[in-house]
């Protein structure tokens, strides 16, 4: 790092402690909760609480593994650089492109969701216009400066967190007081009063794990922000611990309250479960308020996707594993090429979701989940390799460590494998995503062969392939 606050990778250390902590919180709160929980409650019943708790445990170990890796070496390349260091170049290539696929598919869904939400207020405005305007604004923000991104994401997170805190306090008061909610008494009896904890069976409850994993996606954002954070070894452990605690409070706590406030069959996938609850209470204008919150969550997701994929693509490009233009920084020390490549995928998503039915939207989410699982598995595998290297005396293991390693790491990997297998027996979208796995593997294998074939010439020309900044 030089005197101007620029890292060895060329990034500015522009993110403050306040912004990093809120980015970490915001990454753990998204549309998977605001929108997805209602449909999953209607599908699996109160057992969804257990699904969120189980996936939350996995998320806890993933975040602690990430924390240990970040304290070992803070870098904007995050798990891609760790995969390359501890597993091999092919692992960095694979994990990087799977992460990009995750955000490309998520962005396709989110940017269209933004247009749908705005359509509630401006029904005469074509949805593609709204989506295009939102995408343009977010791309501009990411291209201008990381500080501007951090500030925008900070306020996005403030809106989401505030909405959930209000719901949690309101929900606890209603449950403790046994209040009447739309003709139903709130209370713990709703967890077992309509067919028991597993009204649709244990099998259906297991099928929700993929969707819940997607709901937890983006918690790894704090690791990518490490390369542009001042004093990362002081700031990041607290930020990561904060994510872990808030997973339990915001996710598991919210779903538990939802299941106690109304019987599970009162919810549906047609609207946010939070809107369902407040509408049952007769709160005026709640639909518009919650629509604004969900809109914020979608914008936040798109914003984070552009930020993170820009850094990951640059990390790949510096090793000759992505187009050279994605490795360039602009005058503001922002990876403009990578951001623009992801924005093209988002733009394609606007057109795609305009032309095809809702099933394509669901498929995008399911495919995105494959990227989430790959990222989480990569972080766990890298932590296991870091631990082994430390035991051999090759590296110094940080004091901030993943608890219960290596056994907790093996258990988390087994759980993630189970989630993928269960997708083969879930809905149509999940099955399509599952059976697309061989095609993705073949594409990644072919891409890696091309990269390897080009590397000898690159090494003769001067070693590592690195795009000019």
Image: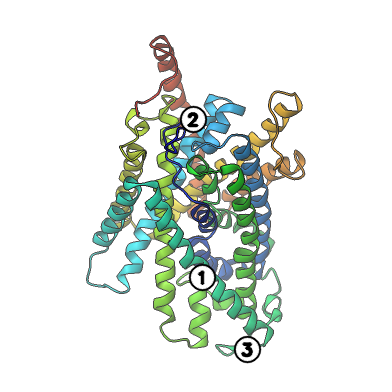
361 shown above or below 37: above
Q: Residues within 10 Å of mark 3 (few under 14, many from 20)?
A: some
The residue lying at 33 percent from left, 53 percent from top is 138
Q: Do we see residue 438 in this rendering?
A: no
User: Would you say 408 lies left or right of 338 here?
Assistant: right
Residue count near mark 1 (Cα–Cα under 10 Å), binned few <14, some 14–19, many ≥20: few
Residue where numbered disc 3 is placed: 179
Which element is circle 3 on? loop
| Mark 2 Cα-neighbour bin, 10 Å: few <14, some 14–19, many ≥20 | many
In the rendered structure, which disc, 3 or 2, sits on the residue that comes first in sequence?
2
Q: Pinpoint residue 8: horizontal percent, then vertical percent.
A: 47, 30
Q: Residue furthest top?
A: 460
Quadrant of the rendered image containing residue 55: bottom right
Task: Tell me whether circle 1 and circle 3 mark residues in contact (CB < 8 Å).
Answer: no
Question: How far apart, in angstroms, are the residues tagged by discs 3 and 2?
Answer: 54 Å
- Asked if marks 3 and 2 touch (Cβ < 8 Å), the reply is no
> The C terminus appears in which quarter of the rendering?
top left
Protein image colouring: rainbow
Q: Residue at x 35, y 47 (%)?
A: 145
Mark 2: secondary structure: helix
Q: Which mark is residue 162?
A: 1
User: Where is mark 2, residue-wise?
Assistant: 93
Of the two numbered discs 2 and 1 on the same chain, state the one appearing first in sequence: 2
Q: Nearer the viewer, residue 463 or 430?
A: 463
For residue 369, side relative to residue 197 (left or right): left
The mark found on residue 121 in the picture is: none
Give the image quarter of residue 197: bottom right
Q: Earlier in the sequence, mark 1 or mark 3?
A: 1
- Where 187 falls versus 457 (above or below)? below
Q: How far from the left and from the top, in percent, is residue 387? A: 71, 32
Q: Residue at x 52, y 51 (%)?
A: 218
């Amino acid at each position: 790092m030089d005197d101007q606050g620029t890292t060895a990778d060329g990034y500015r250390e522009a993110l403050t402690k306040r912004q990093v902590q809120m980015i970490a919180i915001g990454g753990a709160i998204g549309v998977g909760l605001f929108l997805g929980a209602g449909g999953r409650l209607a599908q699996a019943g109160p057992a969804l609480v257990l699904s969120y708790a189980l996936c939350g445990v996995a998320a806890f170990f993933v975040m602690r593994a990430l924390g240990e890796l970040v304290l070992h070496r803070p870098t904007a390349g995050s798990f891609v650089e760790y995969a390359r260091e501890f597993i091999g170049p092919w692992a960095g290539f694979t994990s990087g492109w799977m992460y990009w696929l995750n955000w490309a598919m998520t962005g396709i869904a989110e940017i269209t969701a933004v247009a749908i939400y705005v359509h509630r207020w401006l029904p005469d405005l074509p949805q593609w216009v709204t989506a295009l305007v939102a995408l343009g604004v977010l791309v501009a923000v990411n291209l201008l400066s990381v500080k501007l991104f951090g500030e925008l994401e900070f306020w996005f997170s403030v809106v989401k967190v505030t909405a959930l805190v209000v719901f949690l306090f309101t929900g606890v008061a209603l449950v403790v007081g046994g209040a009447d909610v739309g003709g139903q008494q709130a209370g713990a009896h709703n967890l077992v009063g309509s067919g028991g904890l597993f009204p649709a069976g244990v099998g259906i409850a297991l099928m929700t794990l993929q969707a819940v994993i997607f709901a937890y996606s983006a918690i790894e954002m704090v690791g990518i922000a490490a390369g542009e954070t001042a004093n990362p070894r002081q700031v990041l452990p607290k930020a990561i611990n904060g994510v872990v605690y808030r997973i339990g409070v915001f996710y598991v706590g919210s779903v538990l309250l939802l299941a106690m406030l109304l019987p599970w069959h009162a919810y549906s996938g047609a609207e946010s479960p939070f809107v369902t609850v407040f509408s049952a209470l007769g709160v005026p204008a709640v639909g518009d308020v919650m629509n604004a919150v969900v809109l914020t969550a979608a914008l936040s997701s798109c914003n984070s996707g552009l930020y993170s994929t820009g850094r990951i693509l640059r990390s790949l490009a510096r090793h000759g594993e992505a187009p050279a233009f994605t490795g360039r920084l602009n005058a503001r020390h922002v990876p403009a090429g990578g951001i623009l490549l992801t924005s093209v995928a988002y733009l394609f998503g606007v057109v795609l979701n305009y032309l095809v039915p809702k099933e394509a939207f669901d498929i995008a989410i399911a495919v995105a989940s494959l990227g989430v699982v790959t990222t989480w598995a990569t972080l766990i595998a890298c932590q296991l390799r870091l631990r082994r290297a430390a035991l051999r005396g090759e590296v110094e293991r940080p004091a901030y460590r993943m608890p219960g390693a290596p056994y907790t790491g093996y258990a988390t990997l087994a759980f993630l494998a189970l989630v993928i297998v269960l997708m083969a027996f879930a809905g149509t979208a999940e099955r399509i995503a599952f059976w697309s796995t061989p095609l993705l593997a073949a594409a990644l294998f072919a891409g890696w062969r091309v990269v390897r074939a080009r590397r000898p010439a690159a090494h003769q020309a001067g070693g590592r392939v690195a795009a000019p900044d």
